[in-house]
């Protein structure tokens, strides 16, 4: 094959591609994203435990309590090393070129197509780790609902004040017959200070959302069968966030502004960690093979703000 390609992107140039890849993770639409974490970031949230508002007087009298909650978000450094045959990818790319006009335009170049292939890998892995990740190691990072005591909203790694609700037994996933009661149990546990906040979401995966639609349809809400593109799913007035990476046996109720995702898309590619980087290396001139090596370096991690404002139903 005469076709050859070698490209290298680092720092902010790579950050553009990494950003597009990460944002294939649906959950990022419902999290607060911090894009410029070089090593770690302190997340600070104010919480007025006792109201500082008092009747006006001529004197200064201290009143109320304002607690500053600080958490550390330290993204894990991640990499992808893939060795793929150019023939396989080139066939797929040429097929897309031939279908031009039938849908979305194909990638402008073979390099763009290869990067989009890598983007799918990064997006899927990120979506899963956001929720089910158990450690900042082995290609993973700690997620919100990682198994055992690993997740930020569970036991060990978590803020112990997280509102945890157990329904149906540990690890038991909702069904169409229990999903409404499970969601209601979570909403009943929402702290008074959070009720009615504009950015509160009920997070569930696609399977549990299907259970919910089935349940409300069975109750006679026929509009659940007739959703158009403008439909915004809600339950008891709260918006539903359908996130594929969340486990079947977990539902989360929290503010978008209280769940954080961090990465580094803005570094210049130098210094510790080196910032984001993407390299496409054609191996033909090196070992005579028809392979292409794809390398990506990036960082990702999650953290909560005020744990006591989050509800985990499991």
Image (cartoon, helix red, strand yellow):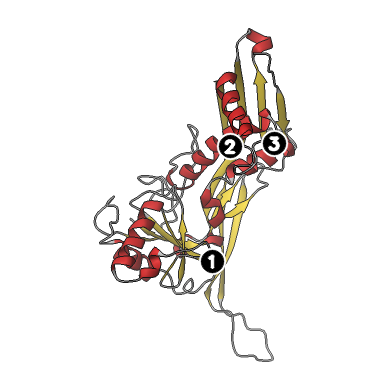
Rendered residue at 42%/48% (across/down) = 151
Which residue is nearer to you in this view: 74 or 188? 188
The secondary element bearing badge 1 is classed as loop
Q: In which quarter of the image is the N terminus?
A: top right
Image-quadrant location for residue 116: top right
Query: Do the CB atoms of the residues marked 2 and 3 lie less than 8 Å apart?
Result: no
Q: Is residue 172 left or right of residue 281?
A: left
Q: Which of marks 1 and 3 is nearer the N terminus?
A: 3
Q: Where is residue 13 in the image (x, y as percent from the top left)?
A: 73, 37
Rendered residue at 46%/73% (across/down) = 195
Check disc 3 and report the residue beneath it: 14
Neighbour class for label 1 at 10 Å: few (<14), some, many (≥20)? some
Q: Position of residue 92 (x, y in %)?
A: 57, 28
Check disc 1 and report the residue beneath it: 199
The secondary element bearing badge 3 is classed as helix
Q: Is residue 136 left or right of residue 265?
A: left
Numbered mark located on residue 260 in the image? none
Which residue is nearer to you in this view: 173 or 222? 222
Check disc 2 and report the residue beneath it: 119
Q: Which of marks 2 and 1 is nearer the N terminus?
A: 2
Rendered residue at 72%/31% (across/down) = 9
Distance between mark 2 and mark 3 Cα atoms: 12 Å
Which residue is nearer to you in this view: 18 or 149? 18
The number of numbered badges drawn on the structure is: 3
Rendered residue at 67%/33% (across/down) = 112
Q: Is 244 above or below relative to 3?
A: below
């Amino acid at each position: 094959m005469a076709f050859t390609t070698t490209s290298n992107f680092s720092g902010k140039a790579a950050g553009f591609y990494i950003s597009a890849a990460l944002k294939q993770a649906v959950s990022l639409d419902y999290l607060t994203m911090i894009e410029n974490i070089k090593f770690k970031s302190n997340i600070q949230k104010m919480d007025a435990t006792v109201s500082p508002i008092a009747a006006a007087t001529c004197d200064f009298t201290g009143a109320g309590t304002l607690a500053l909650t600080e958490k550390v978000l330290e993204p894990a450094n991640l990499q992808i090393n893939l060795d793929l045959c150019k023939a396989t990818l080139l066939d797929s790319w040429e097929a897309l070129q031939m279908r031009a006009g039938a849908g979305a335009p194909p990638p402008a170049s073979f390099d763009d197509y290869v990067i989009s292939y890598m983007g799918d890998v990064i997006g899927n892995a990120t979506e899963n780790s956001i929720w089910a990740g158990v450690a900042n190691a082995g290609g993973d990072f700690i997620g919100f609902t990682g198994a055992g005591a690993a997740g930020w909203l569970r036991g060990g790694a978590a803020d112990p004040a997280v509102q945890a609700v157990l329904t149906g037994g540990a690890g038991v996933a909702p069904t169409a017959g229990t999903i409404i009661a499970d969601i209601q149990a979570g909403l009943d546990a929402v702290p008074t200070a959070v009720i009615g906040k504009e950015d509160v979401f009920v997070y569930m995966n696609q399977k549990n959302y299907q259970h919910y639609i089935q349940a409300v349809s069975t109750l006679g809400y026929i509009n659940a069968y007739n959703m158009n593109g403008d439909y915004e799913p809600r339950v008891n007035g709260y918006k539903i966030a359908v996130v594929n990476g969340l486990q079947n046996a977990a539902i989360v109720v929290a503010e978008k502004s209280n769940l954080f995702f961090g990465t580094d898309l803005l570094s210049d590619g130098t210094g510790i960690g080196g910032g984001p980087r993407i390299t496409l290396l054609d191996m033909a001139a090196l070992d005579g093979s028809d392979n292409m090596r794809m390398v990506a370096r990036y960082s990702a991690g999650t953290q909560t703000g005020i744990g006591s404002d989050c509800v985990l139903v499991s």
